[in-house]
Amino acid sequence: MLFKSVISIVSFKFQRFHINMKHFFKIKTLLILVTVTNCLQGQDTVDISNESPTILNIHRNNSTVIQAVNVTEGTKYILCQVHSQIWNVSLSVIPEISYGSSLTGRDVGMLAVLPSDQPLWYMYLTTNSSEEIRILLQLTFLTQYDPLPGGCNEEFSLRNDPNIHLAVATTKTTVSFSWAGLVNKPDCDKGPVGLDYDLYVTYMEADIFTEEQYFEVLRHVLTAASVRDYSRKVYSVSNSEAQKSQIHVSSYPKRGVIYSIVARYLNSAGQKTTFASYVPTVSYGCNLQDDHSCGEKDVAAIIFTTVGGFVGLFLCYYGHRFFKTEIFVFGFLMFGVLFYQIFALKTNVETPGLVVLAAIFGLLGGSILLGVWWNWGFPIINVLCIGLLTGYIFSSILFYTPFGNLTYWNGAFNYGGTFASGCLLVPVLLLCFTRLLNIVSCGLIGGYLFVLMFDQYMSSGMANIVLNSIRHGTDTDYRNVLVTGPFTEAEKGLTAAWVLVCVTGVAFQLYTQRKRAPFPPCPRKQRASRGDLRALLRGRGEHPSRRGNSENERLIRGENRVQYGTNNGSSSAADSEQEVNTQGAI
């Protein structure tokens, strides 16, 4: 009120005595400096220069004044950004917090003009936390040639809003921002020509929620140059009427990720490109203030993936040899994934109920496939189903890469048709080589089940390969979501382990099965042939019990030349003679 009164008095004097306008602004600037100096008394003041990240300890219920020093010539705007891992802070361009001039949050930034006739520049930082907190603070000086982040804001409270706003859900996160402007082109009706925006993501290591890691990773993405060098670019957009300043990306709960947006401006001459970064925003997909929200493990998931890991290792090295066990496991997986998506689309059952229903129908599906083999014994039918599941994994891997972020897949028909074609590609190419397809499927899917066991303990992102496809199948709006899956050191190590286990498993099974029959005989026909042989022996008056045990077993089995589980050419002369006698008796 005192400041407004002084300004009113000066204005009145100006009108009465016709003081020159230039002298009036000098008086007004002097009064502002005096007022700011009075406000600074009793507060902590921090001097910050351009692009110098500083970690500060902010006392509870205290206010800190940020002062820009060593301001370079040609600076028109100053971007101030403050980051706190857990607690909210308030940043304001005036000492009092008010709507339109301040912002509260964990990752906040303010963009303020630097008047040419004002030698000092201040911002005010406050916190209502009940304890002392640590923050990361940085100033960035912008010239008239740089893009102005959020300079064409028409949605949020600030006039110039350089912040990234997140709406985090279980499966997807909406990244919203304001179009940038230019200092020398204040008109935002049509948007500045030549401005483009790049979205970058930076993932933190899994299961580490410390403040040290938070500051260490964040300080690498505070400027446009560091973001482009350190982060991974996932999408680009231009400010046109056909596009919105919103980007939907996939969510990964309990995993720290930093979202950064860099505005690019190519001048009209096309000779120079300048960059400016918005204030990066961090999301963990959980509440760090709750100790059990982020660090707690799902016991049921651990048990399920541990059992699945050992089953996968068994499939990888011995799946083809134990063919009936393999059929049941693959049937369980295929029908489980299929009916999970069906029930998720057609019912309102929660996730735990969907998992139980998927397990029940998975057991039923595995039993059906095993029954088909037991009664008819056509390998091509079962291997076709196994190949389709392998194709599903192949398509999931393909759409988990940047290939899956093409705008062409936003159409439901485009995505569904291409994904189904990928599922059919594997069995179509390898179905003529039935045994090879079966062994490759055991190695690929068995190896994936094996690494999922470690993925659960390490909280890495390997499970997201299949989860991304399941989300596409259960959420009709998910086709517009960008896949930004993490690929840090943990994912790289597990990917290498997956490849190693898959290759060694396939090689081991091909070597051990090279002299064996491609597939075992049909169990029902094998049992029927044993009954016929017993009846035949009884008709000749020779009860099987009168012969030797080894000879009796060979007769009951049928004594084929190429028998599943025995080597070719290993029959002795006596076995050949006995086979001739048996065939003559038949």
Image (cartoon, grey):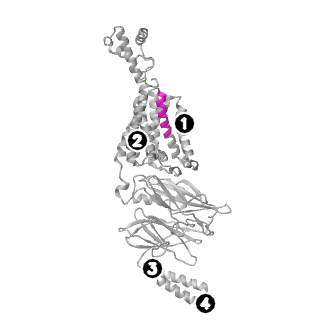
Question: Residue at (54%, 33%) from the top-left corner?
Answer: 428
* Residue with the mark numbered 3: 39
Q: Position of residue 176 (x, y in %)?
A: 52, 60
Q: Earlier in the sequence, mark 4 or mark 1?
A: 4
Q: Amino acid at mark 1?
A: Leu
Q: CA distance from mark 3 to mark 4?
A: 31 Å
CA distance separating discs 4 and 1: 86 Å
Q: Is residue 165 magenta?
A: no
Q: Residues within 10 Å of mark 3 (few under 14, many from 20)?
A: few
Q: Residue 40: x and y, percent?
A: 44, 78
Q: Which residue corresponds to mark 1?
A: 425
Q: Is residue 461 in sight in this rendering? A: yes
Q: Give the amino acid type for the residue marked by disc 4 in the picture.
A: His
Q: Amino acid at mark 3?
A: Cys
Toward the right, the furthest residue is: 269
**Span of residues in magenta:** 379-392
Residue 103 vs residue 486, the one in the foreground: 103
Instruction: Name the magenta segment's main secondary structure.
Output: helix
| Mark nearer the N terminus (3 vs 4) | 4
Residue that badge 4 annotates:
18
Q: Earlier in the sequence, mark 2 or mark 4?
A: 4
Q: Are marks 2 and 4 in contact (CB under 8 Å)?
A: no
Q: Which residue is mark 2?
A: 358
The reply to whether dot 1 and dot 2 touch (C-beta < 8 Å) is: no
